[in-house]
Amino acid sequence: MSTHAHSTAAEGHIGWFEHTVAGIAGSIERAVFTEEHARKPGWLQGVDPRAKMGMFVVLVLAAGLANSLLVLALLYAAILAAARASRVPFDFFVRRVWVGIPFFAGVVIIPSIFFATGPRLFDLTLGPLHIAPAIAGLLGAVVFVARVGVSVSLAVLLVLTTQWADVLKSLQALRVPQIFILLLSMTYRYIFLFLHAMNSLFEARKSRMVGRTDGAEHRRWITGSMMSLLNRSFKMSNDVYSAMMARGFTGRIHTYQTYRMTPPDWLAVALALGLAVGAGLLGRVIA
Amino acid sequence: MHIPDGYLSPIFSLGAGVVTVPIWGLAGRRVQAVLNNRTVPLLSIFAALSFTIMMFNIPVPGGTTAHGVGGTLIAIVLGPWAAVIGVSLALILQALFFGDGGILAIFANCLNMGIILPFVGYLTYRLIAGRAPLLSSRRVWAAGIGAYAGITVSALAVGLELGLQPILFQDAAGHPLYSPYGFGAALPAMLLAHVFGASIVEAIITALGVAYLQKQHPEYLSGMRVAAGADIAEGQAVGRPIGQVIAGVAIAGVVVLALAGLITGGGDVGHLFGADWSQVNWADVATMLLIVAVIAVVLIPLARFLLPQRLKGIGTAFTAIAVLAPLGLIAPGFAYGEGSAADVKQAFGYVPKGLQDLSSVFSAPLAGYNLPLPFFSGANATLWQTAIGYEISGIIGILALALATLGLARLLRRPGTDSTGTSTV
């Protein structure tokens, strides 16, 4: 009874916004913030983060240059195998990538199916409707969506199997200036704080509200809460600054760098390189 | 506006790095030299804010996505070089954690949203704000207009980059390898979605942000430049009567419309918006306007009176749109963007093949937005008769859409709850 009353109260004008924020906060927290998968004893988790970065760049390049569906399918199969070896849950990994991609890449590419020239797959006439997708356009769209899917899968796999601190350190190995790394790590923390604060604002309101209110009240509340969020953020920025100064921050950051490339790391890089070169050669043979 | 991997050729994606990486280096040095340690947490907060704003995006067919960025706001508070770093950081985090925007495409995305956007926005802001006092409302307007310009130019850059792909990268058979839309599709797709949508959102976010800072935290607006040794007059916020603001916006709107009309009409006053106004029978138009006005006076208050409380606002608005829609009939040739394939052919001399195929999809029972009765759409129907046909078909369309939506909502509604919000379980 009480859950129903709650859910109907939430179905106001800002329901979608609230749900989006709560969904984003929840999914990040589960998948990234707890670094649940990055702490598992899998294959990619054990590889040196710098090696992983290199593997990733090589394979994304191979996917970007691939123009055949077969090559992309083989690359995706290899990614799935790597995910398996790294103990990333299969359905979670596949779903996370393929739920969003048809929505974004798919919607963007659909008109091209009808705009391409050449023979048509079929010419369906439904009363006044006239549906005739071009074969070339359809094939191009499938390769396009597959390429985007493989690239995004690679990025998701890299993030899922790497701890955030390691990502930062491998950026340092790539000679990224320290100010960027410092800002990146702080921004990362603030994003969670923002989402958390927003979430608790919504929850606090929801738990004190009965029935519906009008649009003007909603707008007033949203502006008010945005301002209060900004106010709190500025205050927090001052507090963080004071805390940093109190601990002797001089504008330079120091990190321990204890990574060493081991033979298994080199082997993993060689594997990725071989896969990328193989994909390139296969693509050339098909063409 | 995030370009995912696969839309751009890898060569093009990495090529953008030739521009982006040196600017990052320069920005890093500038930020470290000019700003003090205090700005490190502040810049992080703004980057996180930008990240949050960018999460609310919608896909744009033929382009990428449309959303606000917040880059101009960061540039106004912390300077354009800090904005380069702030927006770039938000983009890098999005690419890494959400697959929103490609990883190879990160250079191109940072170029569009992280470099072009804050610099265009900031320079426009400085140009309009001039030497106005820090707390003047002129700075709020300047911020809004600057943000609008910045994000629109940024969307233009995305359209150009996507439009270049099919020209530069094709397979042996001449089929595009990457994003398949040329300039003709990619540019309008990106520009229209922004000019009438995301850019307005961005302008409002930025203007409200600056107004808020003026009121609550003026030290953030001056702090950075005072730290750099500049002397800035603070001044006082001067409230402007709302009537003046509305009049100003109305005049600006008329000027913009007149300019757009002149440009599309090739500079000929008689051909504003490319239509031949000398063909219009103004006596007919006057009759139609009179009849439309009478219908509006009767129908709009009636709708407001009859509709239930929850639908009052939106229902009245839709009725008003339907009643006033025939005003578009005045323009000879084709009105608004409603031209049929034949109209397009007449105007541009050719019809894109895809448009020809797609256009028949939309030939609805009420073709031409009119009723298929001789009184309304016959050859001898006068303008006011056509107008009434337009209005009736518009109202029928809105009612049909409302019924369809209502039916769908009923179907999707979870069992156990009803529309009054009380539980039956």
Image (cartoon, grey):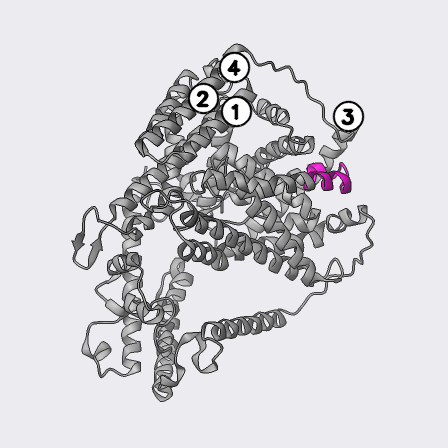
Q: Residue furthest top?
A: A263
Question: Disc 3 sits on a residue from what chain?
Answer: A
The residue carrying mark 2 is: A272
**From mark 4 to mark 1, how far is it between C-alphas?**
11 Å
Kindly identify the residue that appears in the image at 28 percent across and 49 percent down. B408
Mark linked to residue A54: 1
Residue A76: give x, y in percent of width and height.
36, 27
- Our reading of the magenta stretch's main secondary structure is helix
Dot 3 or dot 1, earlier in sequence: 1
- Whichever of callouts 2 and 1 sits on the residue coming sooner in the sequence is 1
Q: Amino acid at mark 2?
A: Ala
Whole-percent x, y for residue B357 in the image: 25, 57
Label 2 to label 1: alpha-carbon separation: 9 Å
Residue B334 vertical placement versus B113 (above, below): below
Q: Is residue B33 magenta?
A: yes
Marking on residue A265: 4
Labels 3, 4: front one: 4
**Cβ atoms under marks 2 and 1 closer than 8 Å:** yes
Q: Earlier in the sequence, mark 4 or mark 2?
A: 4
Label 3 close to label 4 by CB (< 8 Å): no
Categorize mark 2 by other alpha carbons within 10 Å: few (<14), some (14-19), many (20+).
many
Q: Residue tagged by mark 3?
A: A247
Is the residue B162 above or below the residue A273 in the image?
A: below
Regarding residue A107, the answer to whether it shows in the image is: yes
